[in-house]
Amino acid sequence: MSTTYFSLLLLFLCLSLFTSLTTTIHSKPLTSPYLSSTTLFPNYQKMLKSFKIFIYKPNEALTFNSPAESLFYSSLQNCPFVTQNPEEAHLFFVPFRSTISMRSIGRVVKRHREELPYWNRTLGADHFYLSCAGLGYESDRNLVELKKNSVQITCFPASQGKFVPHKDIALPPVSTSHAPHAPENKTTKFLGYFRQVKLKESSLINELVNDPNFLIESEPSDQLTYTMRLASSKFCLFEYGGDVSGIGEALSFGCVPVVITDRPIQDLPFMDVLRWQEIVVFVNNNGGAKELKRALGDTGGKRYEQMKGLGVKASQHFVWNELPQPLDSFHTVMYQLWLRRHTIRYARWG
């Protein structure tokens, strides 16, 4: 036999082996909702032991417009990560209230720049701030450096055009309830449930109103009714840009979230931690009810059970506590900050 024959045979065998290995790898069910559980938990323990944050002293009492902002700030003030020695800090927090003007924010940064040396060392790259309103593009040097270099902690969903992927961090919404243990083998009455808190026109939702497989309603009469809706539905529908506050609750009750959107989402909470594609179904709203039903139909059987189970595991990170607990929302946001503690020193202004 010719050398060419043996070469082709060897190539065929190699391709067959590769295909077999690839199929085995991808067919193996996921048991973790994390991007890398082997690095997450050891790194989380390192963070608990070593992470230090210095908080600049605000020149006024701070108030915030959203519960997530308030809980994050109060938790940060009282957490063991805070140090009074800026020389040992990994990151620096620049506090200001929600209703402050852009000009006043610029003055806050200017004051910190002039009074202490830490801003100028990295032009704010080892600093972070809290703002659900977000910063626009301004000409003031202090605001330019704050937006470009510092980590913005904002609310989900972030204001359009005011979130920088891979730098900024989105806070998970504050949930009103959480299932300590998701119902086992729950009986579902509805294929999908949608809570229409805001009276927003939606052609897709309008198509589903009279469909018996879906329950569309305004705010339920009480919290118990709402949790019963979550527990008795296979999928919970959320429109990106609308009310998404129930995503964590849906996960904890074993109701797989379906996020309806018209564009790629780059501001999901915990993007550095979770495999979002494994716990949430993303559907383009341009396809209407037909596309939604097709996507839900494709997410059935073992795939659905896997997503539900991984979602329940991930739901612990969406819980806000007055007194922070391990791996809750506050600590997972802090972990994302810890991942950003290695700063880049930018070229100086001008």
Image (cartoon, grey):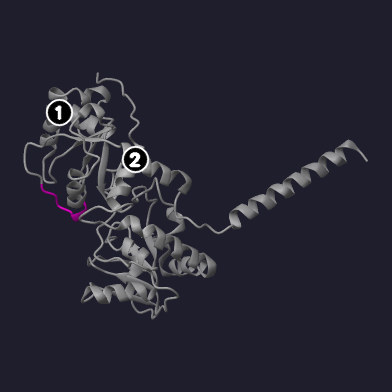
- The amino acid at mark 2 is Met
Check disc 1 and report the residue beneath it: 112
First along the sequence among labels 2 and 1: 2
Read off the magenta span. Answer: 63-68
Check disc 2 and report the residue beneath it: 47
Q: Residue at x 53, y 70 (%)?
A: 301
- The amino acid at mark 1 is His
Q: Nearer the viewer, residue 179 or 230?
A: 179
Residue 170 image point, x, y percent:
29, 48
Instruction: Tell me the chief SS of the magenta region.
Output: loop
As measured in the structure, the alpha-carbon distance from the residue carrying label 2 to the one carrying label 1 is 26 Å
Residue 282 can be seen in this image: no
Extreme left residue here?
Answer: 60
Give the quadrant of residue 173. Answer: bottom left
**Element under disc 2:** helix
Vertical order, 121 against 135 (above or below): above
Residue 26 can be seen in this image: yes
Give the quadrant of residue 229. Answer: bottom left
Extreme front residue here?
Answer: 49
Vertical order, 304 against 146 (above or below): below
